[in-house]
Image (cartoon, rainbow, N blue to C red):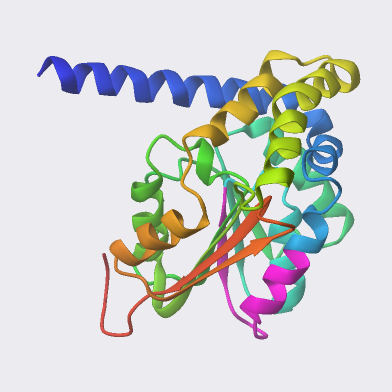
Amino acid sequence: MTKTNSNTKTTKTKEEFVHSVFESIAPKYDLMNSILSFRRHKAWRKFTMKKMNVKPGETAIDLCCGTCDWTISLAQASGNGKMVGLDFSQNMLDYGAEKIKQLHLDQQIQLIQGNAMSLPFDDNTFDYATIGFALRNVPDLEQVIREMQRVVKPGGLVVSLELSKPTWQPFKSIYYFYFQRVLPFLGKLIVKKYEQYKWLPESLIHFPDHKQLAAIFTNQGLEHVQAHPLTGGVAALHMGTKGKTKSGV
């Protein structure tokens, strides 16, 4: 019983801290994303969208959607399919809503403040469930993957685009130096947030590498799992298909 209470407290503490981080960095989130990813995040998302091959009219839920760049890409690819962007940070959603309004996509995209651990949708609702640069921040990544799998239709895709761990040793050392030393300094310099950007690199330390995350996708029952390391392993795309015989998870 003591162990359970301790775990609950730890989970809640992480949840609250992550929420405060993203609420506070929302105004400069897009700028810092470019710095964080060596300005590669748009190319990674373009590669992901090509692999997903979204068809006209298809639907998606974009978890931890932040300022909605990926949600917008999904909506534009679908043309008229209903999209949902879900995030627990209202500040992030507010910035995303402004982008969506400017692009006249507010009739197609619905934004919801919610928890990726417990999605407010029925089983088999969407063609895709996506999560970008956020799976490492959730309290229980397996629970989030289960929820993503639950709400997609049989044959639908669960997709994660996430920072990862470089596989080539010389580059790995340079990357970790940048990530752990340079990035927090840039956060302090550009957005006056040091502790928040010091924490983000730390969130990657215990996160699975691309092979381990692919195994988790498979263990959760997803089929035809693909893992694509990007830019020397700095990021990775993972995709898994919900079995066509499953009505829920």
Q: Nearer the viewer, residue 240 or 169?
A: 169
Tell me where residue 57 appears, x and y as whole percent. 63, 82
What is the quadrant of the N terminus in the image? Answer: top left
Residue 80 in sight in this render: no
Q: Quadrant of residue 96?
A: top right
Considering depth in this image, is 191 or 91 the residue closer to the camera?
191
- The residue depicted at 70 percent of the width and 37 percent of the height is 173
Q: Quadrant of the C terminus?
A: bottom left
Residue 92: percent from left, percent from top: 70, 36
Residue found at the very far front of the displayed protein: 170
Residue 62: name its quadrant: bottom right
Question: In terms of depth relative to the viewer, which is nearer, 156 or 50?
Answer: 50
**What stretch of residues is rendered in magenta?**
45-63
Q: Is residue 108 above or below residue 112?
A: below
On the image, the x and y values in percent for residue 51 come to 65, 77
Residue 91 in sight here: yes
The verdict on residue 46 being magenta is yes
Determine if the magenta segment contains residue 113: no
- Residue at 26% over, 77% down: 246
Tell me the quarter of the picture where residue 178 sits: top right
Answer left or right for 124 relative to 79.
left
- Which residue appears at 78% of the width and 35% of the height? 29
